[in-house]
Structures are given as structure tokens and as C-alpha cells.
Amino acid sequence: MLGSGQLSMSGGWTAYLCLASALTGLFGPAVAVKEHDFKKCDQAGFCKRNRAFADHVVANTAWESPYNILADSASFKDGQLQATILKTVNDAGETVRLPITVSFLESGTARVTVDEEKRQKGEIELRGDSKARKQRYNEAEQWVIVGGLTLDKEAKVDYQDDTQITVQYGPESKFEASIKFAPFSIDFKRDGDTHIKLNDKGLLNMEHWRPRIDASPAPEKQEGEDNSSSETESAETTAAQVPEAYPGEDQNTWWEESFGGNTDSKPRGPESVALDISFVGYDHIYGIPSHTGPLSLRQTRGGEGNFQEPYRMYNADVFEYILDSPMTLYGSIPFLQAHRKDSSVGIFWLNAAETWVDITKEKESKNPLALGIGSKTSTSTHWISEAGLLDVFVFLGPTPQDLIRKYSELTGTTAMPQEFSLGYHQCRWNYVSDEDVKDVDRKMDKFNIPYDVIWLDIEYTDDKKYFTWDGHSFADPIGMGKQLESHGRQLVAIIDPHIKNVDGYKVSEELKSQKFAVNNKDGEIFEGWCWPGSSHWVDAFNAAARKWWATLFKYARFEGSMRNTWIWNDMNEPSVFNGPETTMPKDNLHYGNWEHRDIHNLNGLTFHNATFEALKSREAGEFRRPFVLTRSFFAGSQRLGAMWTGDNQAAWDHLEGSIPMVLSQNIAGFPFSGADVGGFFGNPEKELLTRWYQAGAFYPFFRAHAHIDSRRREPYLAGEPYTTIIAAALRLRYSLLPSWYTAFRQAYLTNEPVIKPMFYTHPNEEAGFAIDDQFFVGNTGLLAKPVTQKDKETVDIWIPDNEVYYDYFTYDIIPSNKGKTVTLDAPLSKIPLLMQGGHIFARRDRPRRSSTLMKWDDYTLVVTVGKDGKTAEGDLYVDDGDSYEFEKGQYIYRKFILDGDAKTISSVDGEDRKKVKEGDWMKKMHQVTVDKIIIVGAPASWDKQEVTVESEGETWTATLEYTPAGKGRAAFAVVKKVGARIGADWKVSFA
Ligand SMILES: *[C@@H]1O[C@H](CO)[C@@H](O)[C@H](O)[C@H]1NC(C)=O
Ligand SMILES: *[C@@H]1O[C@H](CO)[C@@H](O)[C@H](O)[C@H]1NC(C)=O
């Protein structure tokens, strides 16, 4: 769903006309983005200052960072170093005290936190009569961190003198933090080598509090402002009196700043935090989604092929976003990974304020004449946040898996999803009536197109009042919900954080009377424009507001909602049409009087959290996994549901650009992600729509969506051959659902990506580090490379290892080809999909209308025999797909093993666990069996007619059909009607 400006007509015509004309009057007609609607670094005072500061430092070799640890302040106890950094402010030696804590955690992660004593103690004066909190925002941790903070009692000081302290920590004390006092810097080492350096370049900058000195002769005074201070006397002397962080520092934006006609009063003055973090010997860095552009991040300081602007993280409703850009998008995860052959390290910058990251790479040559040989590249990053603490977690790897695991110990793992939510979602803005929904539902059946969820965008409401239905077009939501329910389908309805400001709307009245809304800088309820026109915003930072929010979702209260109704949280950056950069004024006040500036990037997460928790309490005794899609997110949002990449366009390059975006989400700890299939804006040509479905079938979150102005494009409207091809892509997704669900189980346990880029699965193959258009699915060995270009009938796929690969559809063999690119045929009807040898994965092949209807279907196992001709392994996780009973052991987890020497395939319990008393679901699973086993690459010695099956004390035979190898095709064998229970141990013998 889009944000500012573009409005169009449908449904309630009159309401639209009023709103549209009102908005057109305010903002003018809106056509396309709009880069200029969003700040560049030099339009954000703090970013401009810190970049200029960096330029100054880099240009002055004699520069010395003015931050020094007071040697006798340093004390180390129980895994934690405490000290005070003194920042020297001017030549007169004036200093500012900055308490620093370096925590060494049991997980081997180190954390560096720096605060500012004066603000910590609240000993500052605010401009005007601001009610804002005086501290730097210190509650991000409360929202983001859910564990992993136990201190490492084994960490020990290895060396200490007046100039430095060295701490050994981590697994087998292999990690080391070498903290230098003057100037302050930290080198993080693993096995004696430095991998990460903080403040090596001297870009640390904590803008300390200072009293305001009015520079203008006629300063505009705010009521109650302290104007008795002698410093305000003369504008002439001001410049000399104000210490500069660097010569010529631009101080114009210290106390007030305007952009696009909006003025930000800054009651606390300048308070940015910035730091350089260098990755020594690392050439590739990944992460900090969401951005368009390549998975392996670009440099940002200009030069050929580089960006000019830093990567920006300031969650915003970026209308019609552009590709290949470091511009901000709807959500942010400030988790960054550096990678090189044999090593991965990373950092997590825990700061919820607007943040920019500059990236530069330097070649260091040991021998300057060696020209490339023996030279290595190092990457430096410069992190710049507008406010808040300096709070950075340092991960020393050494593998990409370690990084994600450690990061997820802190921020949590992916929620176990509702199983249906891995199926296909049919959405558009808007299905215009309950009859329309029922009609689409019937047509999907008529054309044998599986889907699980149909979605309602904003038009279902009565005049954009959430928790209500338009009485004319949605007169019978229950009848609609029941039709969907009758074949296991679901409804998702949109509910946004802006609440229509109108009398007689109960939700609005309660919001106001209980003071649960966000306030403006004067502490009065904030009013802005969004879909409903004049609106207020729920302040989900307030626990009482969240509790109230939960009451609104009770079945009894949200009439027309049912057990198969789920929620979509859009516009939660938040999008405010008439706000600066389409969001809230930064000086708005949230619960606890934190400024919006402090918490902006967390805003979406808190609202998502409130809705998630609400869905858990819709009815007493109901305890089901919520499904809530969010547009805005932060680190930790993976615990709450799915995200999508926002308002993309029906264009080939947007299809192509979606894959690195989704991969970036996957390696940044929030794998439940996808892009709008078909493209939100515009009308995709049929070939594009078809290719997009084929790609979408491999997004962890698979939803088609379309703008209100676009033509209808449900799959059955595409016509032949497109409809059939799209349906086949959907069937492929549905047959593989057991494997997708198993991949999500892994994401739930360890936050493994659900789809994995090459650097992640093959961290030692340098040629794969920049590849971001092909990926593996979970641990299935399925390697997909969707076609993302027009008229393409072949794709080149990079083979990362010496395993044998088989074509998924034909069983053609791609022989050992490590590091080579092979060309696959990819006519429109085909998705380029390979199977890596050595795996066993599960499918359910019987075509059904929805995933719910597949619940009791038998399984097919696909075995891809490895290059040694005899081994393969895989797993399957199944539970009821809906409740939290799995937490009590109500699930099936099997490991499948092919033993070529013994000529057996067996199924064993996938983990050591106690037998549980079987609940209803597990009992019912007794009827579910393994139907078929397909062995691709089966040796010729398996050319038999029969196999023996042993399970649960019984032995029987099953038929085997063997097909010898053909031209370029692997031999394969199919065991039919295996008949063993999926939940039981069994063994199939080919001997
Ligand atoms: C600020 O100056 C005005 C004009 O001189 C004066 O009336 C007012 O009392 C002063 N306010 C304070 C807080 O000193
Ligand atoms: C939602 O937020 C509350 C308050 O911070 C927290 O207790 C709860 O665990 C959060 N829920 C999830 C699923 O993260």
C-alpha cells in the first residue's frame, strides 16, 4: 500500500473525491518519486556535520581523536570493563565525561556502550518549554534484545598499563579486545589477528550537550526560554565562543532545522553519535537492509560504480522507490556482516534514531610494486546516528552461520509461522466487496489455482475507520469468512496505526480520552493526515495503549472478524502524508516523553508487536500463532511476523531487484520476506507476471499485490499459456511446502536464512561472494535462479561446488563443475531449479486448493544421490501448523538417511528427545504415511522390482520402478506406496 500523494477513485466515490482534492490542494498532484522528497546527507544537519568531520580528519594526517579514556577510571569486573572517556572540547582543555562500558558476553559477543554523563544525569537544559526527556534514548534494548546478555565470567584482563588494557574472552579465549586509552580505540582480534577496529580513523564523535548560544541578533524566543544567560548577549562573539568539532563546522542546524517546509525544533540541540568501524582485510560487506541495490554493499563516497550518498536508515513511506540506491526504505536492520574467504565478522549498531552508514574500501598492498598480488582490501564503515547511545555489538565469527546465530541470541529468532502463511497470498487494493472476494475465491477453484489467503486493503472499512466494515460493500463479512473457511482459507484485513479523527468513532474516542496517542512537541495530541484524512497515531510505546489495542481485536469487539481473519499492519513507519519526509515530526513526543527522533526506527516494530500480542488474546483459551504482516521493521521484528519490500513497480528491473532485497533480509535475521508479485504500481505484461510468479514461488513470503489503478490480474485472468504456467509455479510451491516449513523450523531455532545466498552456503568460494541472483532453499539442496529478464530463454547458473546437480524437472545431470557457469534452458514454462546431490527433501504432491486441506496428505520423499553415488541426508519437520503445542513436543521431526553401502533409506527421530504423550494432532498423524520415494541418481545395482520396508515391528514389500540413465539424464528409481508412517522409524532396503 502506498503512501503520500497518489490517490485514486474507487469504492466510496464521494469520500475519495473529498480526500483527493484536499490532498491535491495540499501537496499537488503526485506522479512518481521523489528522491527530492527525502533527505540527502547534506540535508540532514547531523549527517552533513559528521561527513564534513570525516573529510577533515582524513585530510589531516596530524589529526588526533580528542577522546581519551581516563586511565585510572578503568576497572574490570565479572566480564565488564567500566571507564570514563574524556572528550576534549576546546584548546582551553574543557572536557566532557562519557561513561563507557565494554561487556563481554558468554556467547563471545562484545558490546561497547557509551553514554554522556551530563545527559545521563539529566543535568541539561532544554530549549523552550520542551517536555522532552533529557537523557539519550536508552530503551532500544528493551524492545530489541531478548537474551544473550549474560556476562562472560571467564573473560579476563590479559594486560593492563597506563595506556591500554587487553581482555581475552570468547570460546577458548580466542578473542581479544585491545583497548587503547589515548586516543580511545579498540582492536578486536581473533587468534591474534585484528579483524575489527573501532575509532581507528578517529571519527568517533559524540555531540555533547551545550547550552544554546543564539547566533542571530534577533533570536526568536520561545516562551519560558531562559534568556538571562550571558552567552546570549552578542551574536558577534558567538562564533569564537562556540568550540568547533572541526574547523568550519556548520552549526546552523544545531538547534533547529527545516526540510520541505517542516521545521524541527531541537530542544536538546546537537546530539549525534558517530564512529568508524573498520573491517581489516574484508572486501565484501552485507546487511543493513532494507535497500535496493546489490547484496554485497557498494562504497558510498563516489567513484565509478559507487554511490555518492551513505546508506540511510530512516524508516519511511518511500513512494515508488528507485532501484540501485542507498536511499532509505520502510524498515531498517542495522546489522552488518563483513566477509572474506574463510572468515566472517560483523557488528550490530543498536540505535533507533535516523542512521547513515558510509562505506569505503582501501586496497592495502604489502608490496606496492606487486600490483594486486598480495594486496588485500579492507572496508571501513562510518556510522552516524542522530541521537541515542553509542551501543555496538561486535561479532567475531568466524562463519556467516556464527554471526546470525549470535545476532539472533540477542534479538530473537523467526516466529514459528502459521503454516498457511507459507502458501500463496492473493491481494490487491482492493477487493471491492464481500461478493468480489467470494467470486475470486470461486474462480481460483474453477481454474484449479491453489491459494491460502485473500487480502483486504483499506477500502473494506467504513470510511477508513479500522475495526469497522463498509456497510454497503461488505455487508456480510461473516458469510465471506465462512465461504473461505469452508476450504481452509484465510482472510487478512489491513489495520494501520492512524486512527481517524472523527466524533462518534469509538476507537478514536477511546484513544483520545485515555491519552494513548502520540503527542506533538507541546505535549498535545498530534494530528496529521493519512488515509482517513485527519488522524491520530496509536503510541505503541505505551504498555497501557498496547493493552487497550489488544481489546479491539477481540472477536466480540471487532465484529465480522473470525478465527480465519488475520492482520496486515501497513503505514507504520509511520506514514504521515503531511509530515516531514512523509513521517512524523521528529520533535513529537511518545510515551515517557521520548522524542520521535529517538525512537523512529522502532516505531513500526512496537506497533507490529502490539498487533501480534493482540491476536494472541482474541478469545480466552485461544492460543494460536498470530499472522501479522508489517511494512516497517527493525532488528527484532523477525519475532513478530512477515515483511514485504513495499511499493515496487510492475517492471522487469523491480523483479530482478527483489531477489537481492529478499536475500539481504534473509541474512539479516528477518527471513520471512517477499516482494509484491506482479509489482504494485502499473500493469505487468503477461510474461513479466508469469516470471514474477515463478520467482515469487521462491520468496519465503509469497504474495501478489496490485495498486488500485492497475488492471485486475488474478492468475486466471492471464489467459493461456500464462494461467497454466502460473498455476504450475503455484503447485510447485505447494508441493514443496513441507520443505519450506522445515526451513522455517530452522529459522525458528537458530534464525538460519530460509533462502541462502552463495557466500552463506559456500563461504570459501570467492567467486560467489557477489552473486545475488541465485540461492539455495533451506537445507534441501534446491538451487533456484529465477528468470528476471524479458525474452530470456536460458539462464547461466553458477555452480558453487563439486557436487553433482540434477535438473529438478528432467533429472538431467549437471556434472561436477565447481566454479563454472552452466547454461540451462528456461523457456517461459520453466523455472531454473537444480537439486544438489546428497539431499533428501519432502513434498506433498497431491494438488489441493489450500495448504490446510493438505494437512493429512501423504508425503513424497525426493532423494538426490550424492556424487559418491551412495549418500544423501535430509530432514522434515511437521506440527499442527497453528498452535503452540509444538513447544510442548507435539511435533514430528525426522531425519532421512541414504546408506548406499547398506542399500537402505531410513527414517529416524531427528533429535534426542523424550517421548511425549501424543495429543490429538499427533494421533491423527498416524494415518499419514510416506507414499513415494523418488531416488534421483539411483545406482544401476538398484534395478529391482521390489524393496523391503520395515517399520514398527513389521516387514512388507513395496514396488520399485527403475529407469536407467538416459542421454544426459540420471537414472532414477521410484518406490511406490511405501506405506510407513511419517512419524515412525522405518527402513527401506534395496538389497
Ligand atoms: C526574557 O527577556 C524578556 C525581555 O527582556 C523578559 O521580559 C523576560 O522576563 C525574560 N525571561 C526570562 C526567563 O528571563
Ligand atoms: C512485545 O512487547 C512486549 C513489551 O516490550 C514484550 O514483553 C513482548 O515479549 C513482545 N512480544 C514479542 C513477540 O516480541
Image: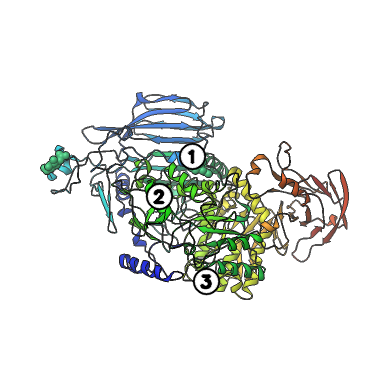
Ranked by sequence position, the earlier of labels 1 and 3 is 1
Q: Which mark is residue 145?
A: 1
Q: Which mark is residue 511?
A: 2
Q: Which mark is residue 496?
A: none
Give the SS element for disc 2: helix
Amino acid under label 3?
A: Pro
The span from disc 3 to disc 2 (Cα, nearest Å) is 41 Å
Amino acid under label 2?
A: Leu
The span from disc 1 to disc 2 (Cα, nearest Å) is 29 Å
Circle 3 packing at 10 Å, graded few (<14), some (14-19), many (20+), is many
In this rendering, position of residue 255 left or right of residue 204: left
Circle 1 packing at 10 Å, graded few (<14), some (14-19), many (20+), is some
In this rendering, position of residue 160 left or right of residue 702: left
Labelled pair 1, 3 in contact (Cβ < 8 Å): no
Ranked by sequence position, the earlier of labels 3 and 2 is 2
In this rendering, position of residue 833 left or right of residue 50: right
In this view, the mark in front (3 or 2): 2
